């Protein structure tokens, strides 16, 4: 079991513990299968995610481990690693998410839930803007010089 599994199980046992799951989700790394042309780099910018159509809904597939993704894909799937925050920010309206599809503790996200997560991320960014790598390096250099 992964930390995500533990958090989902905790939510299933006590709905009041959802904040634990959402915080972990936003701060975790997920693997998204992508549609990459033969011979192209997996890290190539602009590789579109694989979307799955089922029951008149479009799903973005998310996995918390590479082995879960490859078990689902039944092949050596190409993928991108994206943080939960990144997934929230890049997701389009009316797209559902399927987290760890095919596992015992899979979770489906509805568009309204994703919209709420977008609001949470936006509010968090407004309160404390995320620093760029350059800003973080400058701060670290300043701290090193101060010591």
Image (tube, grey):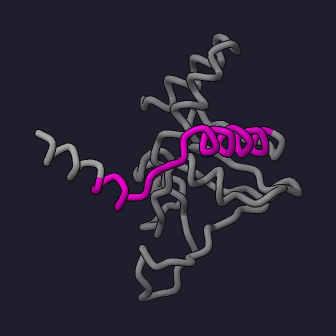
Q: Give the image location of residue 110, x and y in percent.
A: 79, 42
Image quadrant for the N terminus? top left
Above or below residue 38? Residue 133 is above
Question: Main SS of the magenta segment?
Answer: helix
Residue 55 is left or right of residue 8, and the answer is right
Residue lying furthest front: 146
Above or below residue 67? Residue 113 is above
Q: Residue at left 68%, top 12%?
A: 16
Magenta stretch: includes residue 147: no
Q: Give the image location of residue 58, x and y in percent.
A: 79, 59
Range of residues picked out in magenta: 113-138
Residue 85 is left or right of residue 92, and the answer is left
Q: Residue at left 77%, top 39%?
A: 116
Magenta stretch: includes residue 134: yes
Q: Nearer the viewer, residue 95 or 76?
A: 95
* Residue 3 picture quarter: top left
Above or below residue 12? Residue 53 is below
* Residue 101 picture quarter: top right
């Amino acid at each position: 079991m992964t930390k995500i599994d533990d958090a989902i199980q905790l939510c299933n046992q006590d709905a009041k513990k959802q904040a634990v799951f959402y915080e972990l989700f936003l701060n975790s790394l997920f693997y998204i299968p992508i549609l990459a042309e033969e011979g192209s780099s997996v890290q190539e910018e602009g590789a579109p995610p694989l979307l799955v159509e089922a029951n008149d809904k479009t799903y973005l597939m998310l996995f918390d481990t590479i082995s879960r993704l490859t078990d689902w894909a039944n092949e050596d799937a190409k993928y991108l690693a994206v943080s939960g925050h990144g997934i929230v920010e890049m997701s389009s309206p009316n797209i559902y998410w399927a987290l760890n599809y095919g596992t015992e503790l899979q979770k489906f996200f509805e568009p309204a839930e994703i919209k709420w997560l977008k609001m949470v991320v936006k509010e968090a960014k407004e309160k404390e803007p995320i620093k760029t790598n350059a800003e973080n390096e400058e701060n670290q250099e300043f701290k090193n010089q101060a010591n």
